[in-house]
């Protein structure tokens, strides 16, 4: 039976109704009116002795980005990096710290109105691709991609992405697919990765 700690339980409750990235499109002002990261962290009961993630890199894609702290918008949707910071990814503070038990979530744009963004080429990753996440204490956690999937935003697999687990896993999320009439992409791309041991 899987254990659900307080942080994970609260995070799942908060994102159950709005886990998808609704504002990841060229014409949006993503995250503009979001709650502060400190408020999100407090509400999710985030406590850790290992530090917080400050950088993510995917060498095979030439991705090397600092990390913003992302919480929840007033309407309960997960924040995304603002459009003007499209080349910067963000860590969702309601999830696990990368490398600790639970699901850690990093979100980045595919593109914004300013052009291509940090996760523009994320769709090209394959199982076995390496991802490194550096914590502010200097430790680097290494993950290996196990799978990826494109999902309709209206059918986002909340439990699969954010649900409780004792495994040390990482999810990268960006937008994908065609654009709707409002200029928003209709899908999300989710990349699943697990912590390397040894």
Image: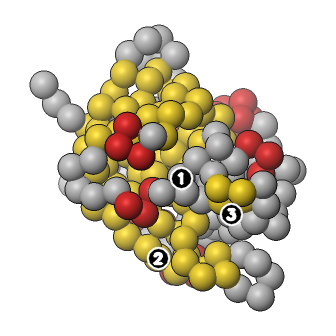
Looking at the image, the residue that sits furthest to the left is 198
Q: Earlier in the sequence, mark 3 or mark 1?
A: 3
Measured as percent of width and height from the top left, residue 141 is found at 34, 27
Q: 142 or 2, which is in the foreground?
A: 142
Q: Residues within 10 Å of mark 2 (few under 14, many from 20)?
A: some
Residue shown at 53% from the left, 52% from the top: 119
Q: Earlier in the sequence, mark 2 or mark 3?
A: 3
Label 3: element kind: loop
Kindly give the residue lying farthest to the top in the view shown.
137
Q: Which residue is mark 1?
A: 119
Locate residue 14: give its quadrant: bottom right
The structure residue drawn at horizontal position 70% and vertical position 85%, both measured from the top left corner, is: 180
Cβ–Cβ under 8 Å for marks 3 and 1: no
Q: Give the vertical position of 93 relative to 119 (above or below).
A: above
Residue 196 x %, y % = 21, 35
Name the residue tied to disc 3. Answer: 24
Q: Quadrant of residue 139?
A: top left
Q: Visible in this render: residue 65?
A: yes
**CA distance for labels 2 and 3:** 14 Å
User: Relative to 9, is 37 above or below?
Assistant: above
Q: Residue 138: x and y, percent?
A: 43, 12
Quadrant for the N terminus, please: bottom left
Residue extending farthest to the right is 33
Whether residue 196 sits left or right of residue 18 in the image: it is: left
Estimate the spatial distance between the alpha carbons at disc 3 and disc 1, rounded to whole Å: 11 Å
Q: Which residue is mark 2?
A: 151
Which residue occupies 59% across, 30% down?
Answer: 66
Between marks 1 and 2, how big is the CA–CA gap?
Answer: 16 Å
Q: Residue at x 46, y 21 (%)?
A: 135
């Amino acid at each position: 039976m899987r254990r659900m700690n307080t942080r994970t339980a609260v995070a799942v409750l908060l994102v159950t109704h709005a886990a998808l990235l609704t504002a990841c499109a060229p014409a949006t002002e993503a995250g503009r009116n979001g709650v502060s990261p400190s408020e999100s962290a407090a509400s999710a009961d985030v406590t850790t002795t290992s530090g917080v993630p400050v950088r993510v890199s995917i060498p095979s894609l030439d991705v090397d980005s600092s990390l913003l702290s992302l919480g929840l918008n007033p309407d309960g949707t997960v924040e995304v990096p603002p459009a003007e910071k499209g080349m910067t990814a963000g860590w969702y503070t309601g999830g696990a710290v990368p490398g600790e038990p639970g699901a850690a979530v990093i979100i980045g744009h595919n593109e914004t109105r300013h052009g291509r963004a940090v996760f523009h080429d994320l769709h090209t990753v394959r199982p076995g691709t390496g991802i490194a996440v550096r914590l502010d204490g200097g430790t680097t956690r290494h993950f290996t991609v196990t799978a990826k999937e494109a999902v309709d935003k209206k059918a986002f697999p909340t439990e699969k992405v954010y649900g409780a687990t004792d495994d040390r896993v990482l999810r990268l999320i960006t937008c994908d697919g065609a654009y709707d009439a409002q200029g928003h992409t209709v899908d999300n791309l989710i990349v699943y990765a697990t912590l390397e041991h040894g």
